[in-house]
Image: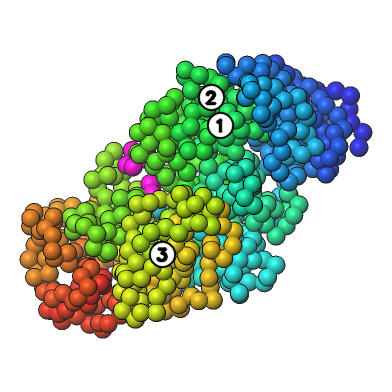
């Protein structure tokens, strides 16, 4: 390949590298650089071939056009500028930088001293300058090729929000031990696209799968030192590039194609694909971290820095640094990444990790922050699902209920109320009822709907549901931190034995509570999210922070999966789909409003009074849901009715039913076949009845 002597002026958009017009256009943002160079390498990224200075800057964009080259070209960036940490600048042209817009990444990362922009061990610390070149070992970008194959946007299911049943899963964890998959496909995007994997999701009634982070990630140095990986992937380096660890393919273009084909296959089955995305921090860590991309390109623009000491990073994430989404070019980076996953890969929505970071301007959270405004106005992102993890590690970081209208939010109040109610740890009927009814105290404002509450009883972060019912404390020793990591206040109860038990009474109590909690999840107003494996009674051995366990601890154990439990969960979500009152799109009103309404009952059939809600002792109660057919697309003039009965007590509780007749649709304990006007609700059970 003959390379030209110099680079022509290019276009300032789009950012990154783009093969077009018989060449490649490069565009890189840096507000404070004095020069940006593109360094070309051989196909393996081992030998530097040529360097070119980019033109500019134009509004902070450095650009250039190189004719005669195209997709597959391997390159890195070098940024020249002031090395003045006291002013927030950490330019070091001796460090080869990864293009933050790279859609294909070449190489394998390993932690080495020369990746740092300062001299490790120097008394000056990060204020010193390391002049060693790291190019041989640095990750490089590769100019992305166009993808062939079906476009997953053409068969996107486009489910309305009230139809969502979300399944949170890890690509490898879900597929690694699924015996129905060919061995070569296990642990991969291709495996998740296999009919056997999809059939399980359909059996459960899942309409959207939420994947733990699949952006290109690297392991933190403290994990690498212990020989452990960042298995969960909450350490994104490449916001535009799929993680190659979970691909059958090895070539970067083929990896992108494999991911895209996975999305298309899931769409064909009526399942949307949501991505858990990490735009709050990067692997560059705090001021003692490496210089890999953003720090070297423009540290002061890309990161929040401490106002009284610009040489230090703000740590609002617990991960060392905080991405500065209040800067328009940083917001653009995030928005461009989101658009790439929607337009190129067909993704249907996103769950934003530590989402308050996106609305910090500069340090306080604002629901009307510029990033959220831009997100609302973006035509590509206007109809995708948006989900917030509504807390971060900064001051006033807990922002549940305070995200803009289109956002759904992970509702930890729901998790704690459901666990506490069924485990008998002091959660009142009133608190449980509020969460059952979509947490109107949190979300009923500003035009928001019940679907804003993403309900879950467990998720990747914390105990699995099985372990909630099997352990009274965390067992995280395998993580190498002397059991210090992970939450200490996990709501759980071992019910008589720590870990697995052969005691029939303990096993029965655990199974009853498991089914009651899963049925509660399916029948609650809001948006349900099932943690992958809870339908299999999957355990992580009491590890409630298994982020670094790429082994059977986190791989779903399909061999031991109880088929009757899978069928039970599928039955619950089938009833949710069948009965519109269980997923009502609007808030319930009072009985006289002519709309759907709730009515709360004591076991004796009388209406709950104010004193009943907080009373100790008896915790069983019932709830009727009514709606006229005009609100449910049924036969005009008819009234639809459902009855939910909750008995968390360790013994049966006598219930008197309202005027019926009522047909029993589900008893979570499996003991009842029908319900008389007065009957005993089994211990630790949830019942669903329909007015005939």
Q: Can you identify the residue that label 1 sits on? A: 286
Task: Tell me where the magenta segment starts and ends, as one range.
Answer: 400-410
Classify 646 as above or below 24. Answer: below
SS class, disc 3 = helix
Left or right: 576 as drawn, with respect to 325: left
Residue identifier under label 2: 312
| Magenta span includes 380 | no
Mark 3 and mark 1: Cα distance apart in space: 34 Å
Give the residue number, with chain letter if any, for mark 3: 467
Residue placed furthest toward the right:
2
Residue 648 in the image: state x and y as whole percent. 23, 68
Q: Earlier in the sequence, mark 2 or mark 3?
A: 2
Is 403 within the magenta?
yes
Q: Which mark is residue 251?
A: none
N-terminal label among 3 and 1: 1
Tell me which label, 2 or 1, sits earlier in the chain. Answer: 1
């Amino acid at each position: 390949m003959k390379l030209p002597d110099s680079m022509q002026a290019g276009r300032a958009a789009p950012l990154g590298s783009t093969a077009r017009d018989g060449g490649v256009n490069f565009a890189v943002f840096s507000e404070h650089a004095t020069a940006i160079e593109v360094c070309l390498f051989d196909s393996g990224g081992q030998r530097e071939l040529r360097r070119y200075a980019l033109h500019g800057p134009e509004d902070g964009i450095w650009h250039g056009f190189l004719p005669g080259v195209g997709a597959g070209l391997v390159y890195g960036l070098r940024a020249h500028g002031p090395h003045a940490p006291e002013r927030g600048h950490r330019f070091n042209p001796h460090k080869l930088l990864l293009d933050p817009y790279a859609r294909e990444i070449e190489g394998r990362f390993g932690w080495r001293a020369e990746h740092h922009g300062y001299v490790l061990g120097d008394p000056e610390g990060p204020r010193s300058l390391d002049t060693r070149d790291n190019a041989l070992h640095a990750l490089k970008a590769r100019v992305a090729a166009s993808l062939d194959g079906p476009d997953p946007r053409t068969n996107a299911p486009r489910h309305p929000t009230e139809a969502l049943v979300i399944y949170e899963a890890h690509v490898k964890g879900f597929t690694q031990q699924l015996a129905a998959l060919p061995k070569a496909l296990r642990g991969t995007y291709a495996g998740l696209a296999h009919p056997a994997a999809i059939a399980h999701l359909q059996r459960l009634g899942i309409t959207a799968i939420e994947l733990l982070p699949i952006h290109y990630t690297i392991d933190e140095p403290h994990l690498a030192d212990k020989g452990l990986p960042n298995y969960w992937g909450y350490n994104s380096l490449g916001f535009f590039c799929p993680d190659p660890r979970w691909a059958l393919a090895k070539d970067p273009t083929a990896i992108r194609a494999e991911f895209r084909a996975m999305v298309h296959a899931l769409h064909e089955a009526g399942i949307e694909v949501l991505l858990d995305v990490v735009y709050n921090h990067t692997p560059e860590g705090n001021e003692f971290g490496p210089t890999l991309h953003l720090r070297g390109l423009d540290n002061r623009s890309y990161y929040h820095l401490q106002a009284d000491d610009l040489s230090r990073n703000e740590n609002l994430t617990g991960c060392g640094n905080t991405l500065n989404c209040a800067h328009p070019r940083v917001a653009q980076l995030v928005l461009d990444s989101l658009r790439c996953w929607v337009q190129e890969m067909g993704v249907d929505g996103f769950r934003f990790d530590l989402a308050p970071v996106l609305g910090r301007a500069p340090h306080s959270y604002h629901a009307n922050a510029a990033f959220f405004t831009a997100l609302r106005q973006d035509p590509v992102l206007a109809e995708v699902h948006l989900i917030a993890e509504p807390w971060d590690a900064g001051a006033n970081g807990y922002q549940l209920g305070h995200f803009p209208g289109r956002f759904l939010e992970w509702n930890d109040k729901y998790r704690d109320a459901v666990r506490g109610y069924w485990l008998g740890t002091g959660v009142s009927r009133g608190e449980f009822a509020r969460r059952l009814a979509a947490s109107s105290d949190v979300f009923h404002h500003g035009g928001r709907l019940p679907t804003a509450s993403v309900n879950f009883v467990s998720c990747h972060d914390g105990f699995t549901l099985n372990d909630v019912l099997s352990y009274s404390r965390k067992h995280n020793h395998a993580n190498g931190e002397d059991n210090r990591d992970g939450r200490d206040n996990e709501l759980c109860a071992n019910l008589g034995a720590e870990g697995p038990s052969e005691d029939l009474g303990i096993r029965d109590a655990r199974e009853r509570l498991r089914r009651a909690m899963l049925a509660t999840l399916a029948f609650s107003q809001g948006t349900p999210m099932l943690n992958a494996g809870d339908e299999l009674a999957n355990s992580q051995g009491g590890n409630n922070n298994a982020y670094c366990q790429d082994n059977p601890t986190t791989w779903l154990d399909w061999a031991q999966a109880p088929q009757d439990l899978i069928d039970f969960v599928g039955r619950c979500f089938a009833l949710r789909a069948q009965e519109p009152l269980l997923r009502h799109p609007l808030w319930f009103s009072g009985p006289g409003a002519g709309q759907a309404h709730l009515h709360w009952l004591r076991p004796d059939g009388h209406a709950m009074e104010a004193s009943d809600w907080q009373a100790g002792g008896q915790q069983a109660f019932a709830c009727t849901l009514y709606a006229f057919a005009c609100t449910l697309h049924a036969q005009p003039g008819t009234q639809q009715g459902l009855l939910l009965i909750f008995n968390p007590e360790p013994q049966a509780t006598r219930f008197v039913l309202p005027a019926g007749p009522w047909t029993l649709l589900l008893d979570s304990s499996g003991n009842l076949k029908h319900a008389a006007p007065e009957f005993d609700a089994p211990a630790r059970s949830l019942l669903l009845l329909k007015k005939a």
